[in-house]
Image (spheres, helix red, strand yellow):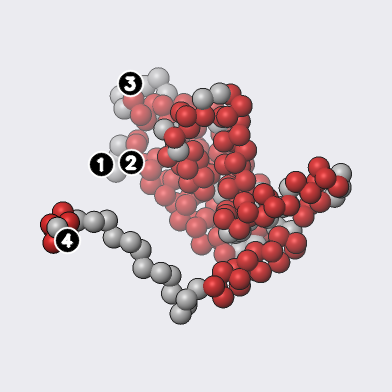
Amino acid sequence: MKELPEVKALILIQKVFRKDTPLKKLSPQERQEKRETEVRPAMKAYLDFVHSLNPEDFSLSEKARDAVSYTIHHEASLTKFLDDGNIPPDNSFYEKIVKTVALGRRNWLFAMTPDGARTICVFDTFVATARANHANVYYYLKYLIEKAPLISQTGREALLDDLMPWSETYRKYEQEQAAQDASLAIGGEDPPRPRTPRKKDKQRSA
């Protein structure tokens, strides 16, 4: 099995990730320096092996031929992470973000109009931006609803900076809201959730 081109390619890819994974805890600059000496040689070994294969060789499986062709045509993009310590070696993080789009697809059928679809996109952008900046989504949307109208009323475009989830103004707002909600909690616990009535409960009450 180890002699199969598909298996050899997978082993070489694993070496790339095994070299890069421990570097996640480093700063972007340190990560880039380490990648130059540790990850780039592993990536080069993988690319050299891929270039030795023929994407039109039908002794390879269909998926293997597609993978070889994809790697050859997107080599510049696949190796971009070696030149910038801020770029991850894969797109797993972005796939997680896009997953929310796929999960909401059925609900978005009821957007009904192009304007409705655009509104949904704007709303989802707010949610994704809040999550990316470790902001509480509920508090951030509440903050936007309360503060955004002030821009049209005052004409102060400078307020736009304060609307960002990383602004000090918003961070202070979130802390105040969280403290206020905590003070309203009874005994520090959430109230019990109502149970769905069961058939035997209805029979007892009757």
Q: Is mark 4 on a helix, strand or loop?
A: helix
Q: Name the residue under label 2.
A: 7
Q: If you read the primary sequence from the N terminus, does the residue marked by circle 4 or circle 1 appear first? A: 1
Front position in the image: 170 or 67: 170
Q: In which quarter of the image is the C terminus?
A: bottom left
Q: Mark 3 points at which residue?
A: 58
**Residue at the image position 75 percent from the left and 63 percent from the top:** 168
Q: Real-space Cα distance between discs 3 and 4?
A: 72 Å
Q: CB atoms at circles 1 and 2 under 8 Å apart?
A: yes
Instruction: Locate residue 80: give its quadrant.
Output: top right
Q: Where is residue 94 in the image (x, y as percent from the top left)?
A: 53, 44
Q: Position of residue 186 (x, y in %)?
A: 47, 76
Q: If you read the primary sequence from the N terminus, does the residue marked by circle 3 or circle 4 appear first? A: 3
**Is 197 on the left or on the right of 62, as rendered?**
left
The label nearer to you, 4 versus 1, is: 4
**Residue at the image position 31 percent from the left and 27 percent from the top:** 61
Q: Is mark 2 on a helix, strand or loop?
A: helix
**Residue at the image position 51 percent from the left and 45 percent from the top:** 97
Q: Position of residue 65 (x, y in %)?
A: 39, 26
The label nearer to you, 3 versus 4, is: 4
Q: Which amino acid does label 2 sit on?
A: Val
